Image (cartoon, helix red, strand yellow):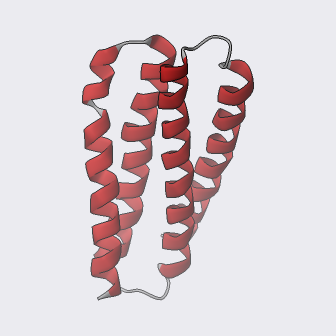
Amino acid sequence: MDKTFLLAGAIAGFIAVGFGAFGAHGLRERLTPEMLAVFETGVRYHMYHALALLLTAALAPRVPGKAIVAAGWLFVAGIVLFSGSLYVLAVTGVRMLGAVTPFGGVAFLAGWAALAVAAL
């Protein structure tokens, strides 16, 4: 699993940097300040959790059990649901997608909780 989460973290980090640059340079003139802030929040949490995936990859060989694996997959789910919904919301303006965002936030929280359980 360590290589899986290393790859997922590297790809997630790459995408976060690309989306951050796109937001700063390609969307600044196209989005309202409010929607640009929404997009930037998605990028920020995306990068935080790309780094969390790299941490999970580094710890996986040293920490036995299912909790570390669960943490990694929950971080992936959180990126897709939380950041992904914010990206789509900001670019399309479809507010119904905001209903998905809390599920991603819960996945992030559960991922951090699973990491804590793995540490125990």
Figure label count = 0
Position in image of residue 11 (x %, y %): 63, 49
Q: Quadrant of the C terminus?
A: bottom left
* Vertical order, 66 against 120 (above or below): above
Residue 27 seen by the camera: yes
Left or right: 115 in relation to 29: left
Residue 2 seen by the camera: no
Left or right: 89 in relation to 26: left
| Residue beneath the point at 72% across and 34% down | 21
Position in image of residue 110 (x %, y %): 27, 61
Residue 3 or residue 14, whichever sits in front: 14
| Residue beneath the point at 42% across and 21% down | 89
* Vertical order, 48 against 6 (above or below): above
Residue 28 or residue 14, whichever sits in front: 28
| Residue beneath the point at 32% across and 43% down | 104
Position in image of residue 4 (x %, y %): 53, 62
Residue 63 or residue 36, whichever sits in front: 36
Left or right: 35 in relation to 13: left
* Vertical order, 103 against 100 (above or below): below
Residue extending farthest front: 33
* Vertical order, 77 against 86 (above or below): below
Position in image of residue 8 (x %, y %): 55, 55
Q: Quadrant of residue 10?
A: bottom right
| Residue beneath the point at 70% across and 29% down | 24
